[in-house]
Amino acid sequence: MMSIIHLIVNLLILGAYLLAQHLWWPWLPDWGIVFWVVLSLVIFVVELALIPYRYAVYQYAVYPTEVEIKKGFFWRRFSAIPIARVQNVDLQQGPLLRFQQLYRITVATGGSNHTIEALSHEQALTLKDQVMTLAREARNDQ
């Protein structure tokens, strides 16, 4: 999703450059346009190529007392979510995830939301049912 946002922002900047060149500053060089288009496309292609690597470092585990989420390659993040604190589990699917037939799961607690990216439909439904079942059991035990 961020790659599409970056591409749109770059196209808006390119449009502003063209407008400024045409209306106010005709002395701006034409190679600036070519440079900006090539740079935008290179960034877009690199971000698309890195998508599998971003999601390859996601790990999650569901235990009777908590959900653990590990993610990150350079900057690692580890989250342990107590099952008793889970309020809701949402499935989300934006346009890029829909294209890849993948889902994002958001585990909502009272104070924050935690996401697990790029799950297949079966994995997402299984994880949602498992976490919500454990959360209901934890609430009933208290």
Image: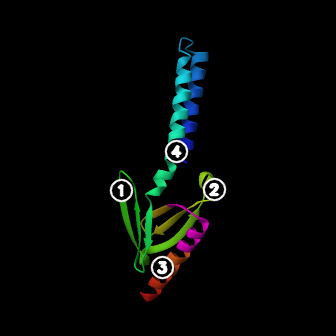
The coloring applied to the image is: rainbow
The tag on residue 84 is none
Mark 3 = which residue?
135
Relative to 64, say whether 3 is above or below.
above
**Label 4: how many residues lie within 10 Å, few (<14), some (14-19) or many (20+)?**
few
Q: CA distance from mark 3 to mark 1?
A: 26 Å
Q: Nearer the viewer, mark 1 or mark 4?
A: 4
**Label 1: how many residues lie within 10 Å, few (<14), some (14-19) or many (20+)?**
few
Q: CA distance from mark 2 to mark 4?
A: 17 Å
Q: Nearer the viewer, mark 3 or mark 4?
A: 4
Q: Nearer the viewer, mark 2 or mark 3?
A: 2
The secondary element bearing badge 3 is classed as helix
Mark 2 = which residue?
98
Seen at 46% across and 83% down, the residue is 139
Relative to 43, say whether 66 is above or below.
below
Do callouts 3 and 4 mark residues in contact (Cβ within 8 Å)? no
Residue type, numbered disc 4 = Ala
The tag on residue 76 is 1
The tag on residue 49 is 4
